[in-house]
Amino acid sequence: MAHPRGCDPSVIDVLIVGAGIGGLFTAIELHRHGHNVRVIESRDGVDPVGDFVGIGVSATRQFAKWPGVQERYQEIRYKPSMAWYTFSGEHLAGPMKALDVPGIPVPVHRPKLQQMLYDHAKFLGIDVAFGKHVEKYIDRSSTSKAGVLTTTNEVIEADLVVAADGVGSKSWQLMQEGQSKTRSSGFAVYRVAFPTELAHQNSIVSKHFPVPQDGWDDVRGWLGPDTHLITATSPDIMTWLYTHKDSDTSTESWSRRISSDTVLQDLSQSGLDWHPAVIELIKQTPPETIVDWRLLWRDPRDVWVSESGRVIQIGDAAHSFIPTSGNGGTQACEDGMSLAACLSLGGRINVALATRVHNMLRADRISCCQRSGFRNRDTLHNADFGELKKHPERLGEMTGRWITQHDAEQYVYDNWEECVNCLVTGRKFVNTNIPPGYTPKPWSIDDVMHGETRDDEGEWT
């Protein structure tokens, strides 16, 4: 006779810290695999902050397995018609329908996506508790439990704790490699989203950034030396993101806001003759709404599991990405797919084994995905405009087929036994979820600074 849910010896009690995209996606996947899941979040509710995030098909195809979610996702995602220009407005490529170009992750308004995931989690009965601030992660190897201590001295325990609480996660104290040191990339991103209706009160903006009448959304990339700007116009939301030189006033936070005057001053000092419509769009941005997000670099880490195997990091807590990777949100979701499948195969008595298998199956892939972000940044910031006009397809190859065609859940099923044998016996295991023909190797930010991502062997597109 089947055990009732929660009593089945294969059912695992999981605590997820962080109700962002990665945390909620993982919670839903774990629930789908039959585990008991609880989510805690430091904020007081679903985070309304943010502009857009690119989510690739290797993650979004999973929505078809969640009742009703695929239909909802189709409603909220952008349908981008993507075109590329120089900073001054010279046309380079496009428009191209991004839904037909797998190499361009489909953007979605971050708050809308997070709300969709939260609504589905609540529909499934997953407990999501807000206002829970984690002071410390706890790893009780002697009791086969892990947990967290909150700032109100509440101790919450589970068979497994998943740290999905971003780059500032306190879980790093339990990781063997410790926390990756940060260093400035020399760049930051001004980023904002606000109502299209407000943007279009400016006649120049409404003329040059119209709402398409064919059901698509107008998305444009503006390229310049050591900089790029992305604009997105949908019926309800106008978004722009401008990568600029870091002036040491930027922060890695959504909370600090600045005025458009600061951005306009940066543009005037850039030495570039930006298209007048871009200037007007920035002028029309509501005051004190622009985030100045500092782009910090971190050397990749390949161990995201505590010594006992009962605390594991996912998403930005494990592996942060630079924006040009177009991959951070996608890989956080893939983490959830992989972890849920591993725990399903391992069961409650093999939680530590399952998390280590997950780590081994994901580490090489994540390293390559992070590496590809720097390759993309080099393409955008050192663009040869003449070559891009001749070969516009290169701008649709930002995300390789080795990323878009991957199925992180199936990859676990296909490689579980071999990976377990590797961990138990020391037999060699070779990942195949990376660029074909590429041999993974350790790398650091210093290597990137010396251009060592430009001549990588293998098929990256």
Image (cartoon, helix red, strand yellow):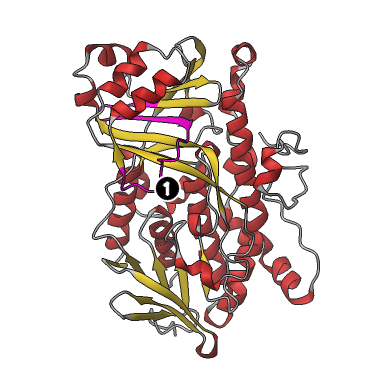
Depth check: give the residue in front, 20 or 424: 20
Which amino acid, by three-letter code, is at mark 1? Glu
Image spot of residue 304 (x, y percent): 58, 65
Depth check: give the residue in front, 122 or 277: 277
Residue at the spot 73% in from the left edge and 53% down from the top edge: 442
Residue at the spot 71% in from the left edge and 43% down from the top edge: 447
Quadrant of the frame with the N terminus:
bottom left
Quarter of the image holding residue 449? Answer: top right
Q: Where 345 sits versus 259, above or below?
A: below
Q: Where 28 sits versus 159, above or below?
A: above
Depth check: give the residue in front, 213 or 23: 23
Quadrant of the frame with the C terminus:
top right
Depth check: give the residue in front, 268 or 113: 268
Element class at badge 1: loop
Image spot of residue 35 (x, y percent): 43, 73
Q: Where 304 sits versus 365, above or below?
A: below
Quarter of the image holding residue 352? Answer: bottom right
Residue at the extreme right of the image, as rendered: 427
Q: Which residue is mark 1?
A: 252
Q: Which residues are magenta?
A: 231-256
Image spot of residue 443 (x, y percent): 71, 49
**Mark 1 crowd level (few <14, some 14–19, many ≥20, 10 Å Cα):** some
